Image (cartoon, rainbow, N blue to C red):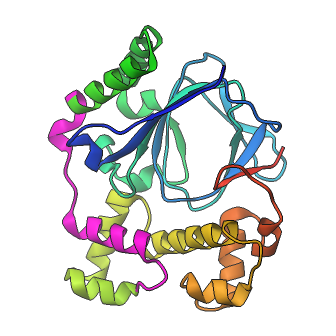
Amino acid sequence: MMIYQIHIPRSPLDEFVELFVYFKGVQHSHSVDRFLPNGDVEILIDFHDRPQFIYDNESLKEIQACNRVWASGLRTEPITIPSGTDAEMMVIAFKKGRAAPFFPFPMQEIADSVVDADLVWGSGLGVLRERLLGAGDTDERFRIVEDFLLREFRSKLDVDPCVAFAVEQMTNTPDSINIAKMNDQIGYSQKHFIQLFRRAVGVTPKSYLKIMRFQKAVATIDASNEHDWRTIALDCGFYDQSHFISDFKHFSGFTPEQYSTIKTNYQNYIPVG
């Protein structure tokens, strides 16, 4: 039986955590997905003891094993991972730009990385996993995770308002943002703000904006069967069609035209094996 449930945590956690996801018994006809950069940071809790693997994007050979609990940082390139068939997992998905209070180091240190939780937080999340394994149902598991995060991190739940403003602007209107003008609104020097942003988000404002423009392009392509590539490029904030194609291929491994022919049930997850 397939189970897929989500939970929105209570305040003040809901300002930093988008949602919790629990799934079990999901079935796919493929075993491997390419996951595209979307600006997200996650903690993943695996209820099985067998490792989950990360694969080389080209050869699909195993390059990293993930065990029990791990953290996945913001990505600037695609990553190839299991499709989730027959897995049982809890995912803590942070709001964009809001994961920093939960990590003991600047977010750029985990960008484009997947790291075992023990190396980040010690044994705490491993103990949390054991409690989840003994829980009676999904609602209890959601409550246990929520209580744990509030107990361990409530005193650290803070965000720089200028970083929050920049993330919101670039996430919601990537097509119309000019970073220089936004810097003028914020009032910091460009160098200082780049340092603040990288510590809180994981990448520079310029890199984050590229990811958000790419995400708008993905959503635009997914929403239609007819595509005017020049119009899409300009509507999503790219300088021209050439830059659009180059960035799209960097973030996905496909040209926009190639991507448009791929059938996928989940945005940002492309079956590759």
> In the image, is 31 to the left or to the right of 204?
right
Q: Nearer the viewer, residue 126 or 224?
A: 224
Q: Nearer the viewer, residue 45 or 18?
A: 18
> In the image, is 192 to the left or to the right of 270?
left
* Quadrant of the rendering where the C terminus is positioned: top right
Residue at (35, 67) in percent of width and height: 167
Magenta-span inclusion, residue 171: yes
Task: Please state the extent of the stretch shown in magenta in the rendering.
Answer: 151-177
Residue at (55, 53) in percent of width and height: 112
Magenta-span inclusion, residue 70: no
> In the image, is 204 to the left or to the right of 106?
right
* Residue 63 placement (x, y as % from top left): 72, 39
* Residue 221 placement (x, y as % from top left): 69, 71
Name the main secondary structure of what is drawn in magenta: helix
* Residue 107 placement (x, y as % from top left): 38, 53
- Eyeballing the image, is 254 above or below 63? below
- Determine which quarter of the picture holds residue 231: bottom right
- Eyeballing the image, is 223 above or below 173? above
